[in-house]
Amino acid sequence: MVLVALALLAAQTVVAAASTDAWAAAKSGVARLLGRGDPERERLAGQRLDQARDQLQAAPPGQELDGVHAELVAVWRTRLADLLEEHPDAAGDLQALVDQVQAQLPAASVSSADHAVAAGRDVKITASGSAVAAGVIHGDVMPPGPSVPGLAGG
């Protein structure tokens, strides 16, 4: 389960890097990991990553971009999960790549319109008196990273 979570985190990080200065590191690192020492496989992985970046850049802002983003995260999650299933020893290298790329990503910027609320971290919704408080989530919600295996609470 930890490897699946790492694959998801890595996919989210790679897709997030596609429109930033961190792209070169993300692309070369993922291509190298997927290539597993085979230059042709590495080249093919690099082409697939470039195609993903092109899809993101071609998508119009808003819901369509969000959809393309989610679709690409799912595709890369699957590819990276397959890698980790076949080569669990690659987990350390993938985690190091994720850490490197995340350090290069710009700070999260969030915005909202109309009656929406956007946040880059936690949102706490409360009501007092006779008021009503509610929240709706559209899209994926994921923890920030895989948890460390071990005993809970102790």
Image (tube, rainbow, N blue to C red):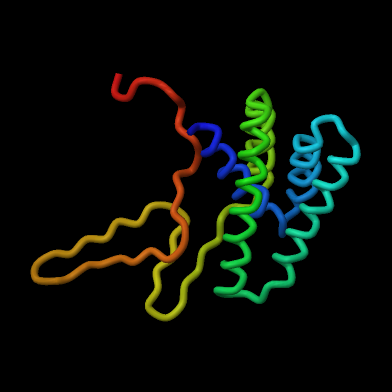
- Which residue is at a point 63% across and 36% down the rendered structure image? 99
Q: Nearer the viewer, residue 82 or 108?
A: 82
Say if 118 sits above or below 141 in the image. below
- Which residue is at a point 46% across and 49% down the rendered structure image? 142
- Which residue is at a point 56% across and 37% down the rendered structure image? 6
42 horizontally vs 104: left or right: right
Q: Position of residue 121 (x, y in %)?
A: 43, 52
Q: Position of residue 137 (x, y in %)?
A: 38, 63
Q: Position of residue 26 (x, y in %)?
A: 74, 45
- Which residue is at a point 32% across and 24% down the rendered structure image? 152
Say if 126 sits above or below 116 in the image. above
Q: Nearer the viewer, residue 125 or 138?
A: 138
Give residue 67's quadrant in the image.
bottom right
5 horizontally vs 94: left or right: left
- Seen from this angle, which residue lies furthest right? 39
- Seen from this angle, which residue lies furthest bottom? 114
